[in-house]
Amino acid sequence: MYVDIQSLGEFSDLASQGADRAADALGQLAGANVYVDVTDVTLMAAGDLREAFAGREFVGVEIGLRGGIAGQTVMAFELEAAESLVERLLPGGGDGELVRSGVTEAGNIMTSGFIDGWADHLGVAIDMTPPAYVRASGTDILPDGTFDDDRQGVFMFESQVSSMDEDLEFTIYMLPEYAGFTEMLGHDGPVGDTGDAVPVNKLPTFNRMTEQGAAAAADNITMMTGTETDVDVSRLRFVPVQDVPAELGTETVAGTVFELHGDPSGYLAILFDEASAEEVAGGMIPTETEPGIGDMEKGALRELGNIMTSGFIDGWANVLDTSIEHTPPQFVHDMGSAVMSPLVSRLGQTQDHAFIIDSTVRTPDGNVRCDIYALPDQRELAAALDRIEPAATDGGSLR
Amino acid sequence: MSPTDSSNAGAPPAQQAPDPDRSAPRRKVALSDAAVAADGAVLVTSGLGSCLGIALHDPTAGVGGLLHAMLPAAEGRPGAPEKFVVDGIDATVAAMADAGADPDGLRAKIAGAAKMIEFNAGGSDGSVGDRNVAAAEAALRDRGIPVVDTDTGGDRGRSLRFDTATGCLHVSYAGGDTIVV
């Protein structure tokens, strides 16, 4: 099943506009400026989705669709976020009814904006059932049939929402029913030129291979510093290129950036928060050093980044059956979003959206956190995915 | 499991602490985005690396605009006008005129365009940051808008706060140093 990148981009833009409208509506309710920092399209294996939603409580709305697109669309907030939002609207007076009406209104605005956009785009009529409020645990919030066996992956739209005036941050999830949307977007074979379409059924495999690459990189941290580490999560997202820096925020990070050359080319950034950077660098330096990130720490982080990158791209090169080279490490120590901006500026010269592959490595005690961001050239990635052997895909789906 | 304790529902209590800019509304400008204010709002944008921030002000009309552009000029590339310095300046000036500014009475301050990373590939035509500054200077000159102050280049990222009431542009760096241009 192939989805052309241009449609995926339009799909993402419509979701983003829907989220902007929902944020405006919430902002009016809350009397605050509420912004969507970024709206991602995440393509995940159903199993990964199950893990991501496990043990969390959600509230949201469910809307049924008929006509041009059939199926169910769900929009959800984490219950805690919805309650905190209501607490701000009405300190001490928040009750279930208010959560229910606020969530229903936001859900209605967001999903109808999205569905209307698609109906216009496709020139078809899509009927919506009235939104039904739902409260559910874990994956019970997801549309019916999310975990049907024949599904290779799930599309999820995730909007990070924040406010300038209040300490307010939450996430809105929107999940269209897979079948209806892939029927609309998908093609059985490649479309256009090589690299114009992404074979979506291969993405979960690719994501798993990325996770193995990240695990190899994490092992390198352990080897170099003696600190036990684990890959917490690895996700593949598709976002407007200008929204990539917002994924990182303004927290100061330290680490290394690499240019990748090969199939695919692109960029890799290995970034630690400052405390983590000091801790791992300290583990590599035999002597006591001044607090902070000085020349010794920079050298250690460069060396570590170099080894982690080799481990990471070996994982890709194996599954994609290509060779990928990387440049020497460039040390960075600045706001996360500023570190990303030159990378997206370069990608942005040729593409409007970007695939961002983000793996988080952590120590069990949570003291060290490292994020590995890969930003491949989208056409080269799509072409490389197409070359993954079907056997590799069949072997690992939905686990 | 069920988070019924709403007293601390994942967030600290609402802050009423005085913030110097608390009285003026604050509006956020994303990357590839611009905002215009005629009400004295403070326009805020963060995380400029190679990107360029262009603050435009009509002191007489009290209208200000802030653009956060990524690349020098569209030249047929896809994306909103605000993704590009040249196209974004035109869009911002037009929006300011709609808000009551005199396009002939504007002045500009620019900040950003750091060179944080040396790239191997395709570096022959200068860094993106340098090209952004050159594009902004040329476009502003062509439109008769004087550049009254700048804080560009270097190797550090910046965040900007543009006070449209006064025309002051606050530039802050990672770690907390702030200068006013």
Image (cartoon, coloured by chain):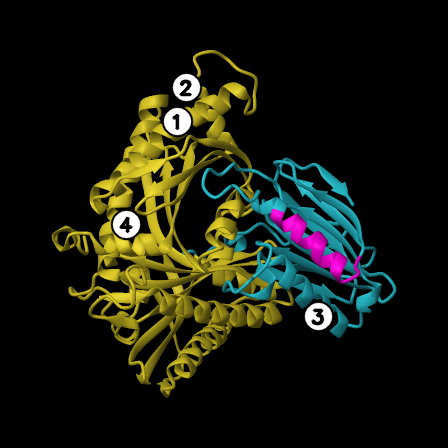
Which SS class for mark 3?
A: helix
- In percent of width and height, residue A218 lies at 32, 33
Q: Earlier in the sequence, mark 2 or mark 4?
A: 4
- In percent of width and height, residue A104 lies at 46, 75
The residue pinned by badge 1 equals A304
Tell me the magenta residue range: B131-145
Which SS class for mark 1?
A: helix
Residue B88 in sight here? yes
The residue pinned by badge 2 equals A284
- Badges 3 and 4: C-beta atoms under 8 Å apart? no
Residue A342 vs residue A46, the one in the foreground: A342
User: For the stretch drawn in magenta, what is the main secondary structure?
Assistant: helix
- Badges 1 and 4: C-beta atoms under 8 Å apart? no
Q: Disc 1 marks which amino acid?
A: Leu
Which chain does cyan denote in the image? B
Q: Is residue A118 magenta?
A: no
- Distance from disc 2 to disc 1, alpha carbons, whole Å, reads 9 Å
**Protein chain holding label 2:** A
Which chain does yellow denote in the image? A
Disc on res. A207: 4
| Residue located 45% across and 41% down the image | B121
Would you call the spot at circle 2 few (<14 residues within 10 Å), some (14-19), or many (20 or more)? many
The residue pinned by badge 3 equals B95
**Protein chain holding label 3:** B
Residue at mark 1 shares a chain with residue at mark 3: no
